[in-house]
Image (tube, rainbow, N blue to C red):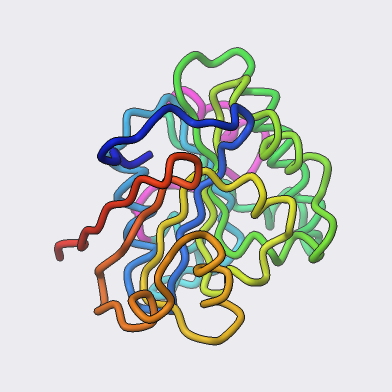
Amino acid sequence: MQQYPDCAPNAVAGRNVTVVAGVSGTGKSTFALRYLANADLAVRFVFDPDPGEFNPRVGEFSDRLQLPAATDGYSLSLSLCQGWTIFDPHTLFPGRIETAFQFFCEWAWEMSLNIPGEKVIVVDEVWKHCSPHHIPPELAMITQSGRKRGVRLMVTTQEPNRLNSSLLNGVSEFVCFKLQGERALAIAESNGFNRAEVENLPALQFIARNCDSGGELRGAIKV
């Protein structure tokens, strides 16, 4: 997603997962939102089950982007025409978040077949919908074969150590804001980051690595 110096094309054709990790308040969510707003994408699929910080009546992404959420079959179909599918699952799947997540992944996968151009699915704290050693087959299709349909996965998390192992194996880009905790820092280190540097990053500053080429860049979010 980012442009890295001296980067060769991805060495592993199936890898299409971006992890954006950082403790609360360091900028990871803003990074994801700005990517969604500025990237040249045909459709942005966003799973949005959690209430917004400032308006709990709507989802977090819907609130921060000031865009209406899709809540039923009609609004899901309409959202494709607009290029923004922010799915609030609580109308179609009350009390069944896991079923809703599986539905959304499969729906995005199927829709992507007939939509040209690049697409992305964004999920916050995706580990909530997986176990350490198992992910839903609907998510596995995206992590393993999404590139065939031009759809990739972006996950944001405070705890990268809680991500499923097969998902971590599919990471093509890892973006680190400040991280804390032995386990989280160990995951960052295993992906080529300097542990001390990541632990001491100032708020809004990040380091991004292409996990295939080893290319790296540093940046800061301007507010």
Quarter of the image for residue 144 reads top right
Residue shown at the point (56%, 37%) measured from the top left: 16
Q: Which of 87 and 12 is in front in this view?
A: 12
Q: Is 179 situated left or right of 45 in this image?
A: left
Residue shown at the point (25%, 70%) measured from the top left: 204
Total numbered labels:
0
Q: Is 102 situated left or right of 23 in this image?
A: right
Image location of residue 146, percent across then percent down: 63, 29
Residue shown at the point (49%, 31%) measured from the top left: 10
Image location of residue 128, percent across then percent down: 71, 66
Q: Nearer the viewer, residue 197 or 66?
A: 197
Q: Which stretch is magenta?
A: 64-82
Residue shown at the point (78%, 39%) measured from the top left: 138
Question: Would residue 77 be counted in the magenta stretch?
Answer: yes
Q: Where 9 falls versus 125 (above or below)?
A: above
Q: Is 189 situated left or right of 76 in this image?
A: left
Question: Would residue 37 be counted in the magenta stretch?
Answer: no
Quarter of the image for residue 152 reads top right
Q: From this viewpoint, which residue is outermost toward the bottom? A: 181
Q: Which of 77 and 5 is in front in this view?
A: 5
Q: Where 220 falls versus 3 (above or below)?
A: below
- State the predominant SS element of the stretch in magenta: helix
Quarter of the image for residue 198 reads bottom left
Image location of residue 102, percent across then percent down: 77, 46
Q: Where 120 falls versus 184 (above or below)?
A: above
Q: From this viewpoint, which residue is outermost toward the left? A: 222
Which quadrant, please, contains the C terminus? bottom left
Q: Is 134 situated left or right of 78 in this image?
A: right
Image location of residue 55, percent across then percent down: 42, 71
Which quadrant, please, contains the N terminus? top left
